[in-house]
């Protein structure tokens, strides 16, 4: 099936080049182009494309205002193009909060130097965004018991599959009807002590993390480590943004940082974060990004280090995101006796990472996004 795209950008050169790259695949059809945000809103209403690509700095109406208007009228997945600068990060985070699904650098050389690789990345991202849930409403919903361990799909030998098939698997589908009476969203059992709470996420994560962390009290009793797929130039601005909004302290992690209760440390973009155990206290190690790994930072790397450093004493939480990063890290944590929670399908922008963990039979609790923060506040001592 062909994916229809509306390109919104005030640069004629950029509109032309992006259109040429996307249409060359045969999987994507550019159905319209707009030169400013206002025109983009009007064409979105008229054409109802599958995906909109959006610049952020345009005359008449900027990209963020356009995204807000589109989400208000008729939500359509939006892929933002922005600069990899501090200011670009700030604006992009505003756009994601307004409802955009994901972003890419506008300077194509920052995506890939090889033209064929650039085309693949752009096309894959458009196809992934087309299967997202823009404006997914994170309304509280009953917690769902994880699937029985006897039927974990991911444990079955799998034949190689194409990227297109993988994308189809990550595309949200209607949730099955519950087979048992739903349990209360926030169970009021005895709070459990954890040495570390680790949260991993990707697409949709900036808004999801904001919703979870703003629900935590200033005296949250456990240290937190956060892994969000994000460029190196974006994570400082993201950490500052979260710190201003949250009652707990949030900052970008630095090599040698010690974990402490009520402090959330965000893995820096472009690098890997590991946690060591120094006399019962966690210590951060920041390592150069390994080119052999797709994600920098990588959830599997951080979670795997926690499985070794704090076996049976960590809570891992997987939020919305493309792909399956975090599944193997959760497997190691689970084998060590630690707990695993994952976000439900209904409130995930992209049900990829949480689905991979749930289908592998690793999830102890599946929770709606707005239930996770209160559940942490109530269930962690």
Image: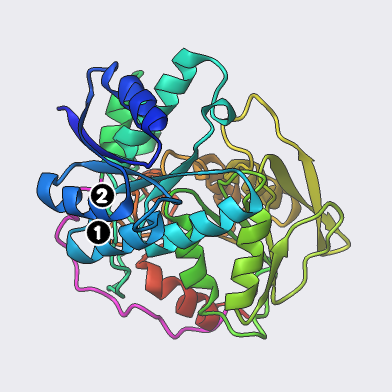
Residue at 40% over, 36% down: 11
> What main secondary structure does the magenta stretch of the protein show?
loop
Contact check, label 1 and label 2, Cβ < 8 Å: yes
How far is the residue under mark 1 from the one under mark 2?
Answer: 9 Å
Residue at 65% over, 85% down: 218
State the image quarter where residue 266 is shown: bottom right
Q: In the figure, is residue 154 to the left or right of 165?
A: right
Residue at the farthest left position: 46
Provide residue 8's location: percent of width, then percent of height: 32, 43
Residue at the farthest front position: 60
Q: In the figure, is residue 25 to the left or right of 31?
A: right
Name the residue that disc number 2 marks: 40
In the picture, the quarter occupied by the N terminus is top left
Residue 314 visible in the snapshot: no
For the record, the magenta segment spans: 172-193
Q: In the figure, is residue 70 to the left or right of 237?
A: left
Residue at 25% over, 49% down: 40
For the residue pair 211 and 52, the one nearer the viewer reads as 52
State the image quarter where residue 113 is shown: top right
Query: Tag 1, which secondary structure?
Result: helix
Q: In the figure, is residue 11 to the left or right of 174?
A: right
Name the residue that disc number 1 marks: 70
Query: Tag 2, which secondary structure?
Result: helix
- Let me know if residue 183 is in the magenta part: yes
For the residue pair 74 and 83, the one nearer the viewer reads as 83
Provide residue 89's location: percent of width, then percent of height: 58, 53
């Amino acid at each position: 099936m062909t994916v229809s795209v509306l390109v919104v950008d005030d640069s004629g050169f950029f509109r032309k080049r992006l259109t040429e790259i996307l249409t060359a695949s045969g999987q994507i059809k550019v159905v319209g182009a707009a030169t400013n945000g206002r025109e983009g809103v009007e064409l979105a209403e008229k054409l109802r494309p599958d995906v909109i690509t959006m610049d952020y700095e345009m005359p008449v109406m900027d990209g963020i205002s356009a995204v807000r208007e589109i989400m208000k009228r008729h939500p359509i997945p939006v892929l933002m193009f922005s600069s990899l600068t501090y200011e670009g990060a700030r604006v992009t985070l505003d756009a994601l909060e307004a409802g955009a699904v994901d972003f890419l650098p506008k300077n194509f050389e920052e995506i890939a130097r090889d033209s064929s690789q650039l085309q693949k990345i752009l096309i894959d991202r458009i196809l992934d965004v087309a299967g997202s849930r823009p404006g997914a409403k994170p309304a509280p919903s009953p917690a769902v018991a994880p699937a029985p361990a006897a039927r974990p799909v991911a444990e079955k030998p799998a034949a190689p599959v194409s990227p297109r098939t993988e994308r189809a698997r990550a595309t949200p589908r209607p949730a099955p009807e519950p087979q048992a009476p739903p349990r209360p969203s926030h169970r009021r059992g005895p709070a459990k002590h954890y040495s570390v709470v680790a949260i991993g996420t990707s697409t949709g994560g900036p808004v999801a993390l904001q919703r979870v962390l703003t629900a935590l009290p200033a005296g949250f009793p456990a240290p937190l480590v956060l892994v969000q797929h994000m460029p190196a130039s974006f994570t400082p601005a993201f950490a500052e943004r979260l710190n201003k909004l949250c009652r707990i302290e949030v900052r970008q992690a630095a090599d040698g940082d010690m974990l402490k209760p009520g402090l959330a440390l965000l893995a820096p973009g472009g690098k890997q974060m590991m946690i060591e155990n120094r006399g019962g206290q966690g210590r951060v190690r920041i390592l150069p990004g390994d080119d052999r790994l797709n994600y920098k930072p990588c959830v599997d790397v951080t979670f795997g280090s926690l499985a070794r450093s704090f076996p049976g004493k960590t809570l891992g939480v997987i939020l919305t995101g493309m792909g399956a990063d975090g599944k193997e890290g959760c497997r190691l944590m689970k084998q060590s006796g630690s707990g695993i929670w994952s976000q439900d399908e209904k409130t995930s922008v992209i049900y990829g990472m949480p689905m991979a963990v749930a289908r592998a039979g690793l999830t102890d609790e599946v929770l709606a996004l707005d239930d996770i923060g209160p559940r942490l506040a109530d269930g962690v001592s």
